[in-house]
Image (spheres, grey):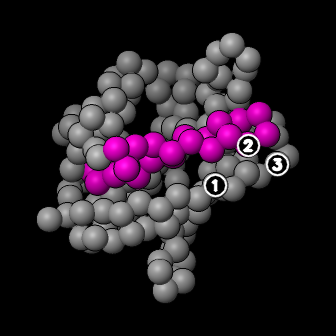
Amino acid sequence: MKRQQLINLLVGVALLTPLSTLADTSKVDGYTIHHNAFATDTLTPEVAKAYGLQRSKFRGMLVVTVRKDAPGTSGTSVPARVEAKSVSLTGQTVRMPMREVKDQKAPYYITDFPIHNQEAKHFVIEVTPRGSHQTFRTEMTQEFFTE
């Protein structure tokens, strides 16, 4: 998938998604981690097919990107080891295997998962950028609506 197509996808998802669910950003020690979760029914059929995802209001998708900060620029996308898990309100932890997808030179990390109406998923994301010995942890909570 071309970079412009992915940018169009993310912009399209942003326009279709309530403001409270737009991508979160975490800045840590010279890196910016962007993370977002949304229902896969917002994906176009072409994008869902390209990523091997099922379009459904009952499936969610977590997207993570990592950028190395560079003064005067928006930074540079960097590969990383990305691990994620969801933690329920009752404390149940579910590991979420992330997979890397590349759009020209930019790596993105995605996973999909089942969702239910009015379910709040709390995500814990750990990122180790290539070339760094530090692992950065960020968290986000997203509520999903299927009705």
Q: Quadrant of the C terminus?
A: bottom left
Q: Which residue is farthest top? A: 72
**Residue at the left extreme?**
147
Labels 2 and 1 touching (C-beta < 8 A): yes
Which one is in front, 14 or 2?
14
Q: Main secondary structure of the magenta part?
A: strand
How many numbered marks does the figure carry?
3
CA gap between label 3 and label 1 equals 13 Å
In three-dimensional space, the C-alpha distance between marks 3 and 2, rounded to whole angstroms, equals 10 Å
Q: Earlier in the sequence, mark 3 or mark 2?
A: 2
Residue furthest to the right: 133
Left or right of 29 on screen, residue 33 = left
Q: Is residue 116 above or below residue 44?
A: below
State which tag comes first along the sequence, 2 or 1. Answer: 2
Residue type (three-letter) at the residue carrying disc 1: Thr
Residue drawn 43% across the image and 21% down it:
3
Which residue is found at the position 71% from the left and 36% from the top? 31
Residue ID at (61%, 20%) = 74
Instruction: Judge whether residue 79 can be spotted in this image.
Output: no
Q: Secondary structure at mark 1?
A: strand
- Check disc 3 and give the amino acid type: Gln
Amino acid on which the number 2 mark rests in the picture: Val
